[in-house]
Amino acid sequence: MNIKKICCIGAGYVGGPTMTVIAQKCPHIEVTVVDLNAERILAWNDENVENIPIYEPGLSSIVAEARGRNLFFSTDVEKAIDEADIIFISVNTPTKTYGKGKNMAADLKYIELCARQIAKVAKSDKIVVEKSTLPVRTAEAIKSILDHTGNGVQFQILSNPEFLAEGTAVEDLLHPDRILIGGDRTPEGQEAIAALVAVYANWVDRDKILTTNVWSSELSKLTANAFLAQRISSINAMSELCEKTGADVNEVARAIGMDSRIGNKFLKASVGFGGSCFQKDILNLVYIAKSYGLHEVADYWEQVIIMNDHQKRRFSNKIVQTLYNTVADKKIAFLGWAFKKDTNDTRESAAIYVADALINEQAKIAVFDPKVSESKVLSDLNYLQSRSSDENKDAISSLDSAYSACKNAHAVAVLTEWDEFKEYDWTKIYESMQKPAFIFDGRNILDKQILEKIGFVYCGIGVL
């Protein structure tokens, strides 16, 4: 099958960057990204590519290259579906907040809406690709909807999960570890797989493109995120023990990371992991295990989340205890609000939960993040519904520089590992703060000896 047109439903953190790179590497294929959010599409089409809605290093330049040539962003969903040979579904699959599986299972309502719209519009055979992270056997439900509510056309369902790390998404797309494509073992299914393989083969070596059945592909994405999150929770569990025993978690991580059986990735102790994937995917895995009666399996993976939540609470508690057991009316500067560096994504960021806990103790929070707006900071805090929006507005502010955020603060909490934080004039920051001046390095990115020489009281994760 010769692919000439691709449609992607969903212009978010996965759909936007993925389709941008496909368009750049496949100039012979017309790629249209559609979304019902008109404001988001307007931002993707902004004449100034620096204003696109997602910040990823290198993304804006590729958008500038491909947009208008063979990359288009539109709200005309039905037209794009009708004309496409391949339709990627890349919509949000949040954790359910209601009904069976509440706070654990994936909410598939947006996936179902996409399937029904495709079934309604499509008048020719289509390949439908799951790009969103989905629970195993979701493809079965999509195929049932398409086959029973469509116009008699033939659909092939493929699973093609993303393995992108925010902050390095463009590099991950240009030079992926692997591309995973799952499909049916039927001749038609294999033909559909071959068509998608041919798209990626425009820039990815064939030996890095893996093909499996649909169920293996769906489960592989959840499993990969669970394993990565497990490593973070494991080193964070050891960080607490290090603080009690006088060990240095950075030295411990370096020692075990040199073991070739373990490796050194994802062994950085911190205030905890965030982002849209890890917690959601592990909870989904827990729910699936419980639904099959595998309670010991579910309990094992749920502990990864429990440890992560504990680490965030432990960090906020440490701030309160160190500041003489009260932070009431004290200013605490937050450096970083995004869940990691090189992204403007704040979903499940540890900063949100640490701020929430400190505001409950009547602290005043001043935030600086290079890529996160004040409106986003307030929106994230309001989403927790711990207090009224007016109370949050009174308790938290967003400043245009780290120096402004830290001025007259009693303490600095580093919540995101932005590289620029290491380059600041920390002597200047120290001189502007209340004394004694504390630094709570939630990402262990600053030099303890230098800061203590300046006069700071330094409190890292897993170090005395």
Image: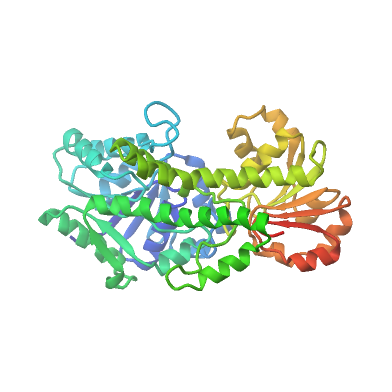
How many numbered marks have been drawn onto this rendered protein structure? 0
Residue 225 in the image, given as x and y percentages of width and height: 42, 53
Instruction: Identify the residue at image location x=66%, y=58%.
Output: 245
Does residue 2 appear anywhere in the picture?
no
Query: Which residue in the rendered view is the most extreme toward the left?
Result: 187
Q: How is the image coloured?
A: rainbow
Residue shown at 31%/69% (left/top)? 208
Tell me the quadrant of the picture where the N terminus can be found: bottom left
Residue 445 position in % (x across, y down): 67, 63
Q: Does residue 463 lie above or below 399 as drawn?
A: below
Q: Is residue 238 visible?
A: yes
From the top left corner, tell me how far across and down residue 185 is, in percent.
Answer: 14, 55
Where on the picture, by quarter, is residue 347? Answer: top right
Taking 447 as reference, is 222 above or below it? above
Residue name at image x 45 percent, y 57 percent: 228
Given residues 259 and 43, the one toward you in this image is 259
Q: On the rendered structure, is 192 left or right of 392?
A: left
Out of 72 and 278, give the one closest to the viewer.
Answer: 278
Relative to 398, 193 lies left or right: left
Question: Where the C terminus falls, by quadrant?
Answer: bottom right
Instruction: Give coordinates of residue 165: x percent, y percent.
Output: 47, 59
Q: Nearer the viewer, residue 54 or 350?
A: 350
